[in-house]
Image (tube, rainbow, N blue to C red):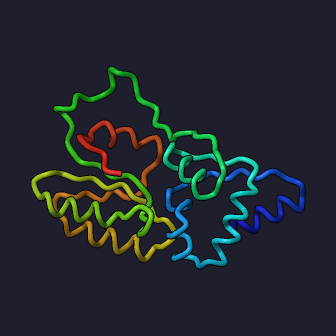
Amino acid sequence: LFFVVSIFARLLHSNVLFNIANESDLDPAYLQSRYGSLFFLFYRWAVKHTDICITQTETQRRMLLSYFDRDATTIPNGYSLPPKSEIQDHSERSHVLWVGRSHKIKKKPMRFVSLAASCPNIPFVMISQPSGDQQYHEKLMQRASVVDNLRFVGPIAPDQIHKYYNDATLLVN
């Protein structure tokens, strides 16, 4: 889709901004094995001809420069901290937290389920929303449901996320 958008933008004399979502979007070996060499050729062309590239991390920026000969502006994802008075003392926190989409390849949420299962005396909380593969998401929920120390929350409203971060002793990402 990105390649098609890039072509139409060129035809319409419009600008294209490419926001890198994940390191795998910049990994030639992954892209070629997953989508094929022809796709990668078009993808590389589209990235090179993008007007503006945005990365979330310096690692992504270096990968973009190394593999695609393109520089980018890095704009980190942010999480606004609450006032210091609302931040819970670490000794009062209760669980290990994972927050993300249930993308089988990019996010690997089953690893968190396995981690929880291997640490039965530690409470774990998983906040996950489907990423397009509803069948995989349901399998994830089913697998999580049999791990006694893991609470699967599912998707929640953005204004509710702070409570989970505030109560977490550790964030696994």
Residue drawn where x is 33% and y is 70% of the image:
140
Q: Position of residue 62 (x, y in %)?
A: 54, 48
Left or right: where 133 falls relative to 73: left
- Residue 45, image quadrant: bottom right
Quarter-of-image position of residue 153? bottom left
- Residue 173 position, x and y percent, is 36, 51
In the picture, measured across the screen, residue 69 lies left or right of residue 136, that is: right
Q: Quadrant of residue 154?
A: bottom left
On screen, residue 13 versus residue 155, left or right, reads right
The percent coordinates of residue 69 (x first, y second) are: 65, 53
Q: In the rendered view, would you say 165 is above or below 129?
A: above
On the picture, is 8 further left or further right than 71?
Answer: right
Which residue occupies the foreground of this view, 113 or 92?
113
Question: Where residue 16 appears, x then y in whole percent?
Answer: 76, 53
Count of numbered marks: 0
Seen at 63% across and 51% down, the residue is 19
Residue reaching furthest top?
A: 85
For image coordinates 53% across by 45% down, the residue present is 56
Split into 4 quadrants, where in the image is the N terminus? bottom right
Q: Is residue 124 above or below residue 105?
A: above
